[in-house]
Amino acid sequence: MKKKLLDVHAIHFILSSVKNTNKLYKYFIGVCQKNGLMKKDLIFWYKLYGKPYLYKNGNFENPKIAYIKKLLQFVLPEKIRSKII
């Protein structure tokens, strides 16, 4: 049986490993644009998904991290997502 790192696990690993969320956010936006995503779409999605999130256990999720996570998990087409991850 061949083991494979699932996208969702790779996303969580990347997000938990980064200390500077602003740098990650800028890098993510740049990579998205290099892969053909329009700035207006990225802005629209940030307004939709870039909201702080409070988990039941009291942990808080940064709006930029929430945005990146939502795009990578649900919004971006698999072809683009696999290039970014």
Image (cartoon, helix red, strand yellow):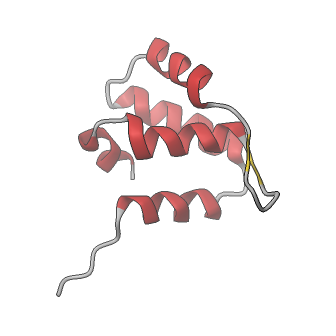
What residue lies at 28% left-to-right and 74% top-to-bottom? 4
* Residue farthest to the front, as pictured: 56
What residue lies at 49% left-to-right and 31% top-to-bottom? 30
26 on left or right of 78: right
* Residue farthest to the right, as pictured: 58
Q: Is residue 44 above or below residue 23?
A: above
Q: In this view, does 64 lie above or below 54?
A: above
* Residue farthest to the bottom, as pictured: 1
60 on left or right of 63: right
In terms of image quadrants, where is residue 24? top right
* Residue farthest to the top, as pictured: 40
Q: How many labels does the image show?
A: 0
What residue lies at 42% left-to-right and 46% top-to-bottom? 73
What residue lies at 63% left-to-right and 62% top-to-bottom? 16
In terms of image quadrants, where is residue 34? top left
Return the x and y of residue 31 as percentages of the image width and height: 43, 36
Return the x and y of residue 44 as percentages of the image width and height: 52, 16
Q: In this view, does 5 lie above or below 52?
A: below
In terms of image quadrants, where is residue 36? top left
Q: Nearer the viewer, residue 53 or 39?
A: 53
| The N terminus - image quarter | bottom left
Return the x and y of residue 48 as percentages of the image width and height: 57, 23
17 on left or right of 2: right
